[in-house]
Image (cartoon, rainbow, N blue to C red):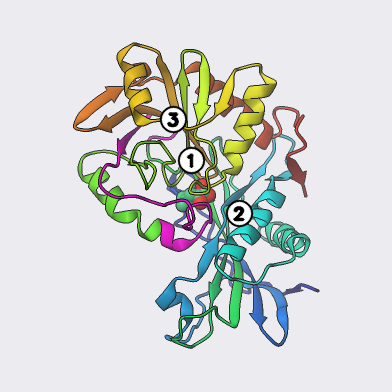
C-alpha cells in the first residue's frame, strides 16, 4: 500500500510553548485510510488537517463503534525525532479492534504512515521540557445504517497535537477521588479495549470529582467494588513498605504501555514490584500504619503523575506530604530521559526517524 501526500498550501501559525495545554491545537496534516468490505483498507493518504464529512447515520454516532490510541513524538537533545514504542500502540489498536469487531489494520503499514506524517509535521514537535507531540490514531465506523451490527465501512485517521502537561498540576501531585458509586468496567466487558464508550461512561464520575476539587477518579473493580483498577487516563501504582504494587491485568484494566515500561524499569533498578490484586482496604490500612509511601499514575498523556491526596469515603488521605516521592521522580527522570535521548535506551523502546 502506498501513501499519497498532499501538502497544505495554507500552513497554520505554530503555538508558543506556554499556549499548549493538552490536545487543543492540531498540526497542519492528518493521515486517513478507508475501509470497505469490497476493497479492505485502502487509499492511505496524508492530507491537510480539516473537518471530515460523515453521514449522520454513520454507525459510530449511534452505537459507538470507535477505538483510539495515544502516543508521543519528541525532539531529542541531539535534534533527532523520536517515537516511543509505537509498535505497541498499533498492536493494542488491533487488540481493541478485535473486541469491537473492527477489521485489523496492517501494523507495519500504520507505523510507516505515522513516521511519514510525523516527518511532514516535524516542525510542530515542541522542544521545551515537558512538551511533546501527542499523536492520536483512531478508527470510526462510517457505514450509514442503523442496524446494530458491525459496520462495513471505517476510517482510520491519525491526528497530532503539540502538547504540554495533561494535568494542570504538571509533575506536581494530583488529587484523586476513589469512585464508590459508578463502575468503569467488568471482566468480559470492554475495559481492556481503548474504546470511546469507556471514556464516555467515565465522565459523570470525573464531573463529580471535579466538583469536589479532585482531578480524576480512581476506579474499583465492577464486581465487588473492592479492588483498585485504574484512573481512566492512567494506570495506578502504590509503594507500600518498599514494594511497588500495581493492579494485575484482569481483563477490565487498560494494558498501559507506560505501565509496562515502568514495571520493566523498576525491575532493572532492583526495586521490588508486584502485579496483583490490591484492595482499597489495603491502601487505607497502609496509610493508617504509615507504610503507604507513594502513589503515582502512569500514562502516555499523564507520563508519571504523583498522587498527593486520595478521597475515600469522605476521608482524605494525604500521601508523602503531597510531595513527589523518590520512586516517582526516578521513573519520571528515566522515562523522560529515554524519550528525549538524554539517557541511553537500554530497552530498545525508541525509534529515531
Ligand atoms: C493517553 O494517555 O494517551 C490516553 O489515552 C489517555 C487519554 C484519554 C487522555
Circle 1 crowding by C-alpha within 10 Å: few under 14, some 14–19, many from 20: some
Closer to viewer: mark 3 or mark 1? 3
Q: Residue furthest front?
A: 224
Closer to viewer: mark 2 or mark 1? 1
For image coordinates 54% across by 63% down, the residue present is 67
Q: Which comes before the other along the chain, label 3 or label 2?
A: 2
Asked if the residue under mark 1 is in contact with the one under mark 3, i.e. CB atoms within 8 Å, the reply is no
Q: Which comes before the other along the chain, label 3 or label 1?
A: 3
Which quadrant is home to the N terminus? Answer: bottom right
Give 3 or 42, whichever is nearer the viewer.
42
Residue 263 vs residue 177: left or right? right
Whether ligand 1 has any atom under 8 Å from the Cβ at mark 3 is answered as no
Q: Quadrant of residue 8?
A: bottom right
Location of residue 61 with respect to 223 vertically, above or below? below
Main SS category, magenta section: loop
Write the start and end of the magenta stretch as one range: 169-198
User: Could you tell me if residue 59 is visible in this image?
Assistant: yes
Q: Which comes before the other along the chain, label 2 or label 1?
A: 2
Whether ligand 1 has any atom under 8 Å from the Cβ at mark 1 is answered as yes
> According to the image, label 2 marks what residue?
124
Residue 125 lies, in percent from the top left, at: 61, 50
Distance, label 2 to label 1, CA atoms, is 20 Å
Q: Circle 3 — which element?
A: loop
Asked if the residue under mark 1 is in contact with the one under mark 2, i.e. CB atoms within 8 Å, the reply is no
Q: Circle 2 — which element?
A: helix
Q: Quadrant of residue 296?
A: top left
Closer to viewer: mark 3 or mark 2? 3
Residue 54 vs residue 5: left or right? left
The label on residue 278 is 3
Distance, label 3 to label 2, CA atoms, is 41 Å
Q: Is residue 171 magenta?
A: yes
> According to the image, label 1 marks what residue?
302
Amino acid at each position: 500500500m502506498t501513501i499519497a501526500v498532499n501538502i497544505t498550501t495554507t500552513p497554520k501559525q505554530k503555538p508558543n510553548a506556554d499556549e499548549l495545554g493538552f490536545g487543543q491545537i492540531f498540526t497542519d496534516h492528518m493521515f486517513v485510510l478507508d475501509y470497505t468490505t469490497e476493497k479492505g483498507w485502502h487509499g492511505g493518504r496524508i492530507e491537510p488537517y480539516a473537518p471530515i464529512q460523515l453521514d449522520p447515520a454513520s454507525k459510530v454516532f449511534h452505537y459507538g463503534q470507535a477505538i483510539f490510541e495515544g502516543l508521543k513524538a519528541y525532539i531529542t537533545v541531539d535534534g533527532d525525532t523520536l517515537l516511543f514504542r509505537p509498535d505497541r500502540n498499533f498492536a493494542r489498536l488491533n487488540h481493541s479492534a478485535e473486541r469491537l469487531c473492527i477489521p485489523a489494520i496492517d501494523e507495519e503499514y500504520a507505523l510507516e504512515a505515522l513516521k511519514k506524517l510525523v516527518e511532514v509535521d516535524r516542525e510542530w514537535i515542541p522542544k521545551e521540557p515537558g512538551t511533546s507531540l501527542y499523536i492520536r490514531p483512531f478508527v470510526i465506523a462510517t457505514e450509514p445504517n442503523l442496524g446494530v451490527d458491525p459496520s462495513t465501512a471505517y476510517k482510520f485517521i491519525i491526528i497530532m497535537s503539540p502538547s504540554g502537561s495533561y494535568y494542570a498540576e504538571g509533575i506536581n501531585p494530583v488529587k484523586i477521588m476513589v469512585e464508590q458509586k459508578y463502575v468503569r468496567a467488568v471482566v468480559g466487558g470492554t475495559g481492556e479495549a481503548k474504546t470511546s464508550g469507556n471514556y464516555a461512561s467515565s465522565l459523570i464520575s470525573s464531573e463529580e470529582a471535579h466538583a469536589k476539587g479532585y482531578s480524576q477518579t480512581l476506579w474499583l473493580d465492577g464486581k465487588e467494588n473492592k479492588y483498585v483498577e485504574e484512573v481512566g487516563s492512567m494506570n495506578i501504582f502504590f509503594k507500600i513498605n518498599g514494594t511497588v504494587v500495581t493492579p494485575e491485568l484482569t481483563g477490565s484494566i487498560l494494558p498501559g504501555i507506560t505501565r509496562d515500561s515502568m514495571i520493566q524499569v523498576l525491575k532493572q533498578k532492583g526495586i521490588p514490584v508486584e502485579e496483583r490484586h490490591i484492595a482499597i482496604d489495603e491502601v487505607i490500612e497502609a496509610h493508617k500504619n504509615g507504610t503507604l509511601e507513594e502513589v503515582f499514575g502512569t500514562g502516555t498523556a499523564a507520563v508519571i503523575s504523583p498522587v498527593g491526596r486520595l478521597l475515600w469515603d469522605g476521608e482524605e488521605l494525604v500521601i508523602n506530604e503531597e510531595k513527589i516521592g523518590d520512586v516517582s521522580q526516578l521513573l519520571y527522570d528515566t522515562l523522560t530521559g529515554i524519550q528525549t535521548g538524554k539517557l541511553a535506551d537500554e530497552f530498545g523502546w525508541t525509534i529515531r526517524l
